[in-house]
Image (cartoon, coloured by chain):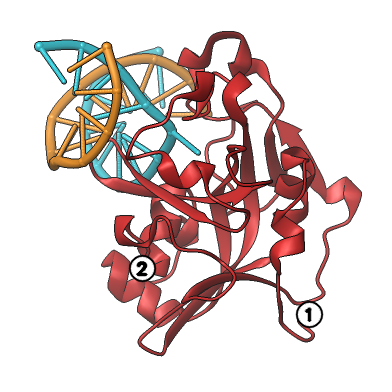
Chain colours: A red, B orange, C cyan
Amino acid sequence: MSGTMKKLDESFYDRNDVLKIARELLGKILVTRFDGVLTSGRIVETEAYAGEGDRACHAFGGRRTARTEAVYGPPGTIYIYICYGLHYLFNVVTNKKDIPHVVLIRALEPVKGIPVMLERTGKETPDYSLTRGPGNVSRALGMNKSHSGRNLLSGEIYIADDGFKYKKDQILVTKRIGVESAREDAERLYRFIVKGSPYVSAKKS
DNA sequence: CGACCGATCGTCT
DNA sequence: GACGATCGGTCGA
């Protein structure tokens, strides 16, 4: 199932097509390695946020604050912010610097380091909630706000291709979750999920 | 299963 | 002062 692990390089993120990138991230492996402790999981759910014209995007209207600065970073930048005061949400910044196209990683299928993930989340035994939902993904992989603004090309957090690829008919496209306040942009079909994966979060469309 | 609710706090108005 | 790109639990049908 897994061949050679090849870290995605800048050319993967440096493209003017955040929907395509969000779709292609399905099946890739998100890895963290802090102090030699490795945890990883296969991405099974993503959402695209398409820049200044997307009401659901933190950069809507060109809004630029200390919090969202990373969203305007070069391709491969990591953007992590706190949601509801207690969850960290991990995003991948794509496209050229100053073009705020990002992909939220919403769910993983755990691959390596499951015992460590259990420690981090305080769970006794693995279940589907371990890496289901964006808040849980960050908790299980040990990511927090201090990692925002770093990049995926040369650090402790990266995304790799192990040769695995989902077939076209295994992928579903739906509306994004929890963005009702984005009015008409809440209708955009920007969420990509692996059909039937028990790790995929809230089943809305 | 769906609806609702409390936790919790940084960020922006 | 209000509001989240959430989560896990409870309650009732």
**Mark 1 — on which chain does it sit?**
A
Name the image quarter holding residue A10.
bottom right
Dots 1, 2 in contact, CB < 8 A: no
Q: Earlier in the sequence, mark 1 or mark 2?
A: 1
Give the quadrant of the C terminus of chain A.
Answer: top right
Mark 2, Cα crowd under 10 Å, few <14 / some 14-19 / many 20+, is some
Q: Residue at x 72, y 41 (%)?
A: A18
In the displayed structure, A69 sits above or below B11; it is below
Q: How many marks?
A: 2
Residue at the extreme bottom of the image, as rendered? A36
Q: Residue at x 83, y 59 (%)?
A: A166
Per the model, the C-alpha gap separating discs 1 and 2 is 25 Å
- Which SS class for mark 2? loop
At label 1, the amino acid type is Met
- In the image, residue A146 lies at what x, y percent? 30, 60
Q: Nearer the viewer, residue A204 or A69?
A: A69
- In the image, residue A36 lies at what x, y percent? 41, 90
In the displayed structure, C5 sits above or below A62; it is below
At label 2, the amino acid type is Gly
**Mark 2 — on which chain does it sit?**
A
Q: Residue at x 50, y 43 (%)?
A: A71
Per the rendering, the mark at residue A142 is 2
- In the image, residue A202 lies at what x, y percent? 53, 37
Name the image quarter holding residue A99.
top right
- Which SS class for mark 1? loop
Q: Residue at x 58, y 49 (%)?
A: A93
Residue at the extreme right of the image, as rendered? A168
Mark 1, Cα crowd under 10 Å, few <14 / some 14-19 / many 20+, is few
- In the image, residue A204 lies at what x, y percent? 59, 28
Q: Mark 1 — residue? A: A1
Q: Nearer the viewer, residue A64 or A46?
A: A64
